Each structure stands twice: as structure tokens, then as C-alpha cells.
Image (cartoon, rainbow, N blue to C red):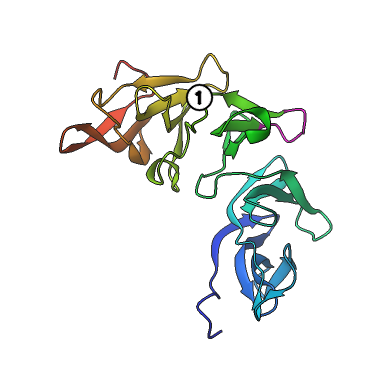
Amino acid sequence: CSTSNCWVGYQIEYNGSLYGLGYGATSGREVFVTNGTSWDLLIDLSPGMNFGIPKMTNPTEFVEYDGWLYFQTGAHAGQSLYRTNGTASGTSQFVESSVYTYARNIVFNNELYFVRDGILYGTDYELWKTNGTSSGTGLVKEIDPSSSSSMCTDWAPCYGDGFQIIGNRLLFAANDGGNGTELWVTDGTSSGTVMVKDINPSGNSDPDDFYVINKFLYFFAITGPNRRDFLHRDGTSQR
């Protein structure tokens, strides 16, 4: 392939095959699959061409949950959460626009968590979860009750490692509109979704580069003027 558009990424094993983003000359960047012999288009979610270039949906953030393979894609206006059973006919939109493009989907306590713009429900980008049903899909908590987003207020807290799990706690970065972007934790309930600590009382701490080792979260954060430190927490405000 001689075009800069043709690359692969976000591969994940699902039901004995490898799925991920791939490129086809007529499909563009879409969901592809291989069983080890060929790299084939699963479904073209955005068929057609624009000025001789194939329309493409750029699927990302694949994760298996409850027997389905979920992923983000720009098949409609904005990003949407799709799922597939590994067949073209079994691939469909699960959550309408708009899911945040750079936020990781993660399975926690047998539910799938993701960042969504709930503009239809009066919120901007906030933390959502689903149990795989429409009735079981909803907002975890409106962390910033204003019209601003609490999640993904800049790229770093949502990029790749933006969620990490320690035991029965899910840790992430969020902005409640008063304390700036800080480290937060949830047990999956609204009342159990709280700020761990205001690490930088004078502004955003912007915690990022999350890694879990021996039940501790290690990360970088701004702790004061012109100061960025390497910290660790166990998911509570005490340590």
C-alpha cells in the first residue's frame, strides 16, 4: 500500500480472530479482521468516496464485554459506540453520538465504562456506563453540574491510560468545575464517585501517565507552580 492512510492499529483478539483498524482502497480505515491468513474488511460503516478518497470511520478503543466486541467509530455525526458479534450483520450502533474520541473504554465490575457527551440529557462529556442493555446504560455522575465537561477537559487525562482499576475502584482524571482537573475515583455509584484529593489547590494537577503496580496507582501530576511530581495513591484520600 502506497498511501499514508493505510495503517493498522488497536488490534484485539476476539473469538479466535484478530480485529482492529485496517485500511482498504475502497473502504478507507474501517474494522478489519484476520484469522491468520488474510486481513479482511468486516464491514464498511461509511461507504462511498469524497473527492476520490474513500469515506472512513477510523474505529478505535476496541474492548470485549459480555460476548460482544465494542469500539468507537465516526460512522455518524461525531463518535458513536458500536458493537459487533464478529459478523457484518451483527455490527450496529449501541450508543448514539457523541462518545469522546480519545477516551478509553474499560470493563469494571462487570459493566462497560466510557466517556459520553450527554447533550440529550443536559450534560457535556461525563462518565457513563452500560450493562449491555439500553435500559442499563446511563450517566454515573454529573461531576461538573455546569454546562462544562468534567471529563476530557484536555487530551492527557483521556488518552490511552485515562482509566485504571485498583480492586473495586476505578480511578480517572476529572474536573468538577471548582477544583480543577484532579484525581477521582468511583465504585460505580453516584455517591461513590468522589475526588481522591485536591493535589494542586492552586489550579489543575492534570494527573496522567497512569500505571498500577502492587495495588497502587503511579502517575505524574502538577503539585504547585512550575512543579510536576511522580506520585502514588491507593485510591483513597489518605495515601
Q: In screen coordinates, is 60 left or right of 97?
A: left
**Residue that label 1 marks:** 146
Q: Does the magenta stretch include residue 230?
A: no
Residue at image coords 25%, 26%: 200
User: What residue is shown at x 33% (from left), y 36% (from top)?
Assistant: 207
Q: Residue furthest front?
A: 147
* Element type where label 1 sits in the image: loop
Q: Position of residue 45 (x, y in %)?
A: 73, 62
Q: In which quarter of the image is residue 51?
A: bottom right
The correct choice, above or below, for 163 with respect to 74 in the image is above
- The residue sitting at 77% across, 51% down in the picture is 92
Residue 226 in picture, x, y percent from top left: 15, 38
Which one is nearer the viewer's eye here, 155 or 186?
A: 155
Quarter of the view holding residue 111: top right
Q: Nearer the viewer, residue 218 or 91?
A: 91
Residue furthest right in the image: 89
Whole-percent x, y for residue 31 in the image: 67, 63
Q: In which quarter of the image is the N terminus?
A: bottom right
| Direction bottom: furthest residue | 2
